[in-house]
Image: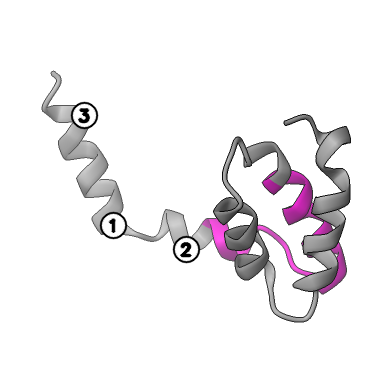
């Protein structure tokens, strides 16, 4: 689904979840199904503007997970 066709739903989700948080809005968008990753970029940017948040907090949660890094490395090592 192209952004121009789904922009009204992105605006709706940004409005609906403005007081709840970025994670909840992105989860709701994902649960709608379909190819949602383009929508999530736009929705995440809007939510960041609305709530004054940056991606640093979310990115750091992923980067600091040694368990996830270890699992990914083990997976990759299995193919070498």
Q: Residue at x 73, y 55 (%)?
A: 44
Q: Is residue 74 left or right of residue 21?
A: left
Q: What element carries label 2?
A: helix
- The Cα–Cα distance between marks 2 and 1, rounded to whole angstroms, is 10 Å
Instruction: Specify the label residue 66 is tagged with.
Output: 1
Q: How crowded is mark 1: few (under 14 residues within 10 Å), some or many (20 or more)?
A: few
Of the numbered discs 3 and 2, the one sitting upstream in the chain is 2
Label 3 and label 1: CA atoms lie apart by 15 Å
* Residue at x-position 44% and y-position 56%: 62
Q: How far apart are marks 3 and 2 (CA)?
A: 22 Å
Please give the range of residues in magenta. 40-59
Residue wearing tag 3 = 76
Quadrant occupied by the C terminus: top left
Residue 31 point in image, percent of width and height: 55, 55
- In percent of the image, x 81 and y 52: which residue is there? 9
Label 3 residue SS: helix
Q: Quadrant of the N terminus?
A: top right
Q: Nearer the viewer, residue 41 or 62?
A: 41
Q: Residue at x 62, y 62 (%)?
A: 28
């Amino acid at each position: 689904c192209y952004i121009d066709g789904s922009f009204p739903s992105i605006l709706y989700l940004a409005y609906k979840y403005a007081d709840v948080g970025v994670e909840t809005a992105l989860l709701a968008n994902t649960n709608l199904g379909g190819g949602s990753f383009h929508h999530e970029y736009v929705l995440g940017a809007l939510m960041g503007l609305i709530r004054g948040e940056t991606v640093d907090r979310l990115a750091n949660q992923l980067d600091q997970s040694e368990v996830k890094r270890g699992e990914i490395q083990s997976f990759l090592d299995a193919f070498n």
